[in-house]
């Protein structure tokens, strides 16, 4: 009986993951505070795939996914540079740019990126279209206490936000894997077919914390 009580207290304290299937986060205003913090216990990544879907009408720079460790604020960052119209993956504080991307406003886009520390190559997939594979950083893993933020861009570990780099719009289906997905698996994700959910971040079992004005809403709002 005592054991059962202790167990209840313990599980009551830990944030329980939620199934966010069919849902989205709405970031309704420009701030330097509102964000969603995603929790993972994993601290070492020798390879990464991150996928999400987002919708915005922003005509300025904005962060789509910001992972920081104490060693580097841009350990894994996906950033839209509106001046140059380039999608920028930053990995271990190094940056590469992908121009000529079909990143139209006011539409949902599926954005995936992959990187592995053996080859050091990064690749971007926008709506299933692969970019060229570019060298960015090889030889060492992303390592350390991981803070993952949606809606803001970290200039320090868990902070240093700038409203002019915040995300305003909707975001859904965020997954992260600690390996490189095959092109087929990426297409399955893009086409919303059966795919293996992220083993680091799983939208169907997401550990998250909303800070400020971010809403969790149904993704499809239809009239009947
Ligand atoms: C983060 O997740 C780990 C395990 O995945 C869990 O032990 C810990 O309690 C979580 N922390 C928060 C703040 O939810
Ligand atoms: C993702 O979450 C779903 C729902 O809890 C679970 O069935 C599935 O096994 C999880 N997948 C991974 C890879 O963790
Ligand atoms: Ca910044």
Image (cartoon, grey):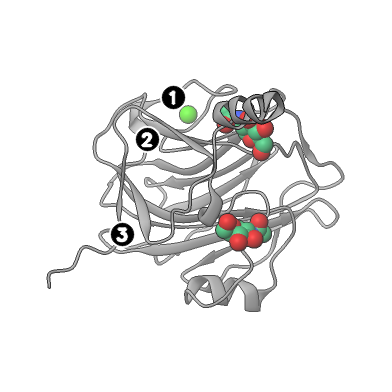
Whether residue 67 is visible, yes or no, is yes
Depth check, front residue: 98 or 104: 104
Q: If the image is split into quadrants, where does the C terminus sit?
A: bottom left
Q: Name the residue located 59 percent from the left edge and 36 percent from the top edge.
A: 39
**Dots 1 and 2: beta carbons under 8 Å?**
yes
Q: Could you give the CA–CA distance between mark 3 and mark 2, rounded to whole angstroms?
A: 21 Å
Q: Name the residue located 50 percent from the left edge and 38 percent from the top edge.
A: 208
Task: Indicate the secondary structure of the residue bearing disc 1.
Answer: loop
Looking at marks 3 and 2 on the same chain, the residue that comes earlier in the sequence is marked by 2
Query: For the residue carrying disc 1, how many other residues have a C-alpha within 10 Å: few (<14), some (14-19), or many (20+)?
Result: some
Task: Indicate the secondary structure of the residue bearing disc 2.
Answer: loop
What's the mark number on residue 219? 3
Question: Is residue 154 depicted above or below 99 in this figure?
Answer: above
Judging by the rendered image, the residue that carries numbered circle 2 is: 166
Could you tell me residue 5's position as x and y percent? 62, 26
Question: Is residue 147 depicted above or below 156 in this figure?
Answer: below
Task: Indicate the secondary structure of the residue bearing disc 3.
Answer: loop
Depth check, front residue: 195 or 114: 195
Query: For the residue carrying disc 2, how many other residues have a C-alpha within 10 Å: few (<14), some (14-19), or many (20+)?
Result: many
Q: Name the residue located 58 percent from the left edge and 53 percent from the top edge.
A: 202
Looking at marks 1 and 2 on the same chain, the residue that comes earlier in the sequence is marked by 1
Depth check, front residue: 86 or 214: 214
Judging by the rendered image, the residue that carries numbered circle 1 is: 161
């Amino acid at each position: 009986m005592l054991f059962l009580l202790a167990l209840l207290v313990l599980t009551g304290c830990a944030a329980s993951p939620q199934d966010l299937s069919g849902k989205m986060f709405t970031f309704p205003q420009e701030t330097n505070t509102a964000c969603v913090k995603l929790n993972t216990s994993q601290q070492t990544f020798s390879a990464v795939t991150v996928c999400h879907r987002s919708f915005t009408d922003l005509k300025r720079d904005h962060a789509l996914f910001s992972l920081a460790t104490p060693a580097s604020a841009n350990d894994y960052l996906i950033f839209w540079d509106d001046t140059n119209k380039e999608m920028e993956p930053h990995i271990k504080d190094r940056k590469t740019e992908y121009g000529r991307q079909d990143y139209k406003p006011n539409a949902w886009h599926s954005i995936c990126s992959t990187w592995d520390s053996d080859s050091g190559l990064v690749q971007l997939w926008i709506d299933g279209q692969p970019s060229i594979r570019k060298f960015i950083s090889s030889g060492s893993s992303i390592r350390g206490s991981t803070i993952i933020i949606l809606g803001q861009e970290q200039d320090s570990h868990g902070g240093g936000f700038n409203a002019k780099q915040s995300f305003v719009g909707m975001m859904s289906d965020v997954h992260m894997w600690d390996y490189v997905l095959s092109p087929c698996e990426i297409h399955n994700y893009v086409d919303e077919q059966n795919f293996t959910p992220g083993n680091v971040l799983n939208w169907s079992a997401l550990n998250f914390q909303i800070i400020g004005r971010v809403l969790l809403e149904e993704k499809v709002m239809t009239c009947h």
